[in-house]
Amino acid sequence: MTTIYFVRHAHSVYSSDEYGRGVSEHGKEEAERVTECFQQVHVDIVLSSPYRRAIDTVEGIAESKGLEVRTVENLKERTLSDSPVEDFNSAINKVWSVPTFSFPGGESNAQAQHRGISTIRHLLNMYEGKHMVIGTHGNIMVLIMHHFDRQYGIDFWKQLTMPDIYKVTFNQQNLIKVERIWKE
């Protein structure tokens, strides 16, 4: 069995700098609590989206385990549009209701899911039998989970918290179990 702990990033203050935007002061406190959640958990590798807020959320786990955070470009959040959308909730509803639709400069659900699934399949092969922590984002995480089990969709995404942690167990490339382990 291979275990992936998807760790959705802690709170951050919005800015258009996706790569550089870190967690907020409140997010730093949350990241410390995320690290505490992993005190008794075996971890072989810590991976992350290259976005600072995702790295900030999992770097305490890596430090506590004597590991480094390895960034993976294709684990970044989906690009919704090349410019701010007028109504974020309407835009999200649109891309989830029409999986091939994309806003100018953005990724459709189908495109982002393909990118995420290709990466996860590669990681499952590379780290078979290991326990991975992946610093991630809400949309890309749910798109990946949705590929394996359709119950994980927009309604599931809407109930996520920042941060949030899901333990996802695989037997080779097959999803076996999903368990939420974040407790506020």
Image (spheres, rainbow, N blue to C red):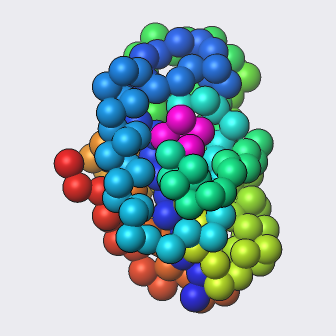
Relative to 51, residue 41 above or below? below
**Residue displayed at 68% across by 17% down:** 82
Relative to 152, residue 175 above or below? below
> Considering depth in this image, is 160 or 98 the residue closer to the camera?
160
> Considering depth in this image, is 163 or 79 the residue closer to the camera?
163
**Residue displayed at 65% across by 43% down:** 49
- Is residue 81 in view from this perspective? no
Whether residue 101 is in magenta: the answer is no
- Is residue 48 in view from this perspective? yes
**Residue displayed at 36% across by 21% down:** 25
Q: Which residues are magenta?
A: 54-59
Q: Specify whether 155 is left or right of 53.
A: left
> Considering depth in this image, is 48 or 114 the residue closer to the camera?
48
Tell me the chief SS of the magenta region. helix
Q: Specify whether 115 is left or right of 60.
A: right
Whether residue 57 is in magenta: the answer is yes
Task: Where is residue 90? Give x, y as percent.
Answer: 40, 26
